[in-house]
Amino acid sequence: MKKICILFLLVTHGLFAQTIKGSFPQLQKSEILLLGFNGFETKELAKTTTDSLGNFELQYPKAFVGAALLEIKNTASVIILLNQENFGMQWDDVKDFNTLQFSNSPENDAFATGITVNQAAENKLNGLKYLLPQYEKLPKQQQWLQEEIANQEQQFNTYLNQLPKDSYAKQYLKIRKLITDFPQTANRYIERMPEHEKDFNALNFNDEKLYTSGLVKDLLEGYFQLMESHIEPKEMYVHINTSIDAIVKGLATNTTFQQEVAQHLFNYFEKRSLQPAAEHIALQMLNQTNCQLSEKSTNLFEQYRKLAIGKRAPNIIFENKDKRVKNKDLKSINGKYKLVVFGASWCPSCKTEALELLEHYDTWKTKNVEVVYISIDTDKAAFTEAYQNAPWQTYCDYKGWDTKAAKDYYISGTPSYFLLDANNTILLRPNNVNHANAWISQKL
């Protein structure tokens, strides 16, 4: 009976796993890790150690279709494609990718060939487009150049069309090329922007194979950076918001990934000071009726519904009588302007930006700007040590993220800033101290 059970386990394991057999002769007794992409993160698919000859065997889940990172500990890493194949790898020199060979893997062969085809076409295009204006007065030569440019521009698509419909490499290469085209378009081929926008908005963001490609972050950030770089601000937000709508709508049936993408984009827009775009995606997500937002998502997005510029910021009651607080609440502070800062003693960025606050504080005081620092510390000793010499008013109730002020302001990260007028009306949501100082220097 025991033998039968063992045999059953071996058979069923084979049904649900694929095998990679490899030989890396330079690497003996080295740890190899296979990481599958999972949205914006990675997950471990398999792990093993090479033998005394550099040979190894990995078994990855048959259900996983996507890109994976094969990591050789402290040595090298390489992207490979997995699509229910049992295949082999031979890498004679891990410092030279040209020595990496696959056997019995149409997916990885197609991937490598596609990269080569694209690079060759791009190199030729660069030369052809450089020559084109130099033959302006020679119609026949210029016509040949234009025809050859059109031919080279189709080389990659021609190659993709030859691949089987169920080829994962076909989909992966198409998206990867779009990503690599973004900076080239921004620098040299700005006329391609409408085509990129059309292709991007037509993507199926709900496709599981995109989720496992490892390309989502570069795809999103590359596209929106392209939009930002070559469109006037007012028009830019029309284009950006249209693409945001396409993403949110496309992920309507995959609410988990929808929240991940929305959070990533929200943070990206905030980081690049694209507040109208951050506000748009926040409101889009808050208005969704098909999903229950997580607490983290709600806190991020509610900032733009309840704490948008022009809204009245919540009053903050300073409940304790610590000598660092001179007022009973935020409303009673007499400054014409107030910079409310949320930070903590354990936050590295808060420490760095606190030094920047010190640099500007005396100047701001002459302009009637008060700084109010709300700490989300829980350790009284750590709080006291960090802020005992701070010249501005500092408040902490030692409740951490549960402090009422942090909840009222939907704080999910530190440092966070709000520039208010005397009536607590929000004038600016600074990204950092320098952003706040730029506004104060210009306006006051």
Image (tube, rainbow, N blue to C red):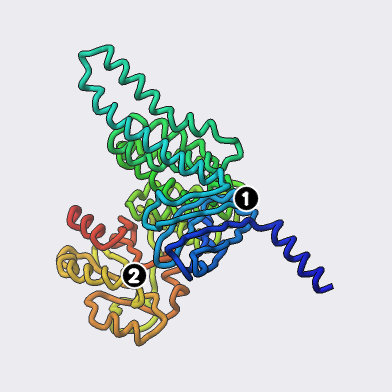
Note whether residue 298 is visible.
no
- The image position of residue 286, as x and y in percent, is 52, 52
In the image, which is nearer the foreground, mark 2 or mark 1? 1
What label sits on residue 84 in the rendered view?
1
Q: Nearer the viewer, residue 15 or 37?
A: 15
Instruction: Give the residue type that dot 1 points to.
Output: Gln
Q: Nearer the viewer, residue 275 or 229?
A: 229
Crowdedness near tag 2: few (<14), some (14–19) or many (≥20) residues, C-alpha within 10 Å: some
Q: Earlier in the sequence, mark 2 or mark 1?
A: 1
- Please say if the residues under marks 2 and 1 sit with CB atoms less than 8 Å apart: no
For label 2, the SS is loop
What label sits on residue 330 in the rendered view?
2
Quarter of the picture containing the N terminus is: bottom right
Instruction: Give the residue type that dot 2 points to.
Output: Leu
Q: Nearer the viewer, residue 397 or 18?
A: 18
Note whether residue 409 is visible.
yes
- The image position of residue 349, as x and y in percent, is 31, 69
- The image position of residue 337, as x and y in percent, is 25, 62
